[in-house]
Amino acid sequence: MQPTYLPYLGYFELIAASEVFIFLDDVQFARRSWQSRNRILLSGQEQMLTIPVRGHDRDTALDSIHIADDQPWRAKHLQSLRHAYAGRPGAAEGLAFMEEQLARPADRLSQFTAGLIEAAASRLGLAPRFVRASDLGCGETRSRHLLALCRAMNVEQYISPRGSEGYMTQEGVFEAEGFPVRFMDFVPQPYEQGSPEFTPYMGFIDAVMNLGWAGTADLVRRPG
């Protein structure tokens, strides 16, 4: 999976199901994607938090994108989180984690987001082997690139989010090679957000702010 900022809970369900988790950080960076932003809830309304990045060529790989730390985005994100989740049951745990992460030096976007994801996974009791695709030097594109990564790590099965099934089936690379693939569905489980209606697919930090780490871990591990 591409390292993203404050990924949704389905991302951690994939981590929970994996023995080896590869951050797909050698793909092209896309502006206005989850690579650099995600949503939280503020007074029942979605609010986007975005990490600003420095100027770059259009085809620059994600692992070569630099954070624009000349902008005060870290303080602004922390302020937004405090304002959005003040008084929620898990706010103390969630804010302590984000204060720690937002204070962590990181020049490159994927370095920061992958580190945050690994730290969150640890808090959730998840401990696969984390690997960066950029460290493996695999070529090819799309499905062939994914298969090359699997071969490089000598794994026996590839676990994928359901959203990739269409193009992977169409390309037929894994099927032709007889390499097993399991597609995972993510079904949002409602939890108390302090709003009249549940809003799914928020950044995972929304669950932490409302449930704490223990409650979020239970949600991630829920069968189905």
Image (tube, rainbow, N blue to C red):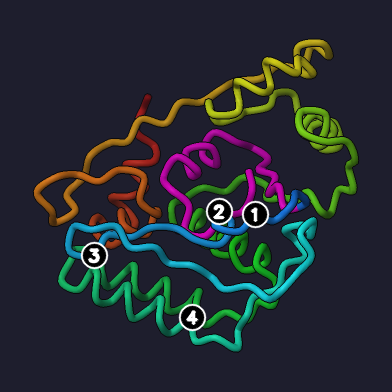
Residue at numbered disc 4 = 73
The C terminus, quarter of image: top left
Q: Measured from the top left, where is residue 178 in percent x and y?
A: 79, 11
Q: Measured from the top left, where is residue 100 in percent x and y?
A: 47, 78
What residue is rendered at 40% in x and 81% in y?
76
Badge 1 local density, few (<14 within 10 Å), some, or many (20+)? some
What residue is rendered at 41% in x and 71% in y?
97
Residue at numbered disc 1 = 30
What residue is rendered at 31% in x and 57% in y?
206
Extreme left residue here? 196
Specify the segment rendered in magenta: 1-25
Residue at numbered disc 2 = 33
Residue at numbered disc 3 = 42
Spatial CA distance of label 1 from label 2 is 6 Å
Mark 1 or mark 4, earlier in chain: 1
Q: Measured from the top left, where is residue 148 in percent x and y?
A: 85, 33
Query: Could you tell me if the residues under marks 1 and 3 are in contact, i.e. CB atoms within 8 Å?
Result: no
Q: Nearer the viewer, residue 135 or 57?
A: 57
Badge 2 local density, few (<14 within 10 Å), some, or many (20+)? few
Q: Nearer the viewer, mark 1 or mark 3?
A: 1
Badge 4 local density, few (<14 within 10 Å), some, or many (20+)? some
Spatial CA distance of label 4 from label 3 is 17 Å
Is 57 located above or below residue 16 in the figure? below
Amino acid marked by disc 1: Ala
Q: Nearer the viewer, residue 70 or 207?
A: 70
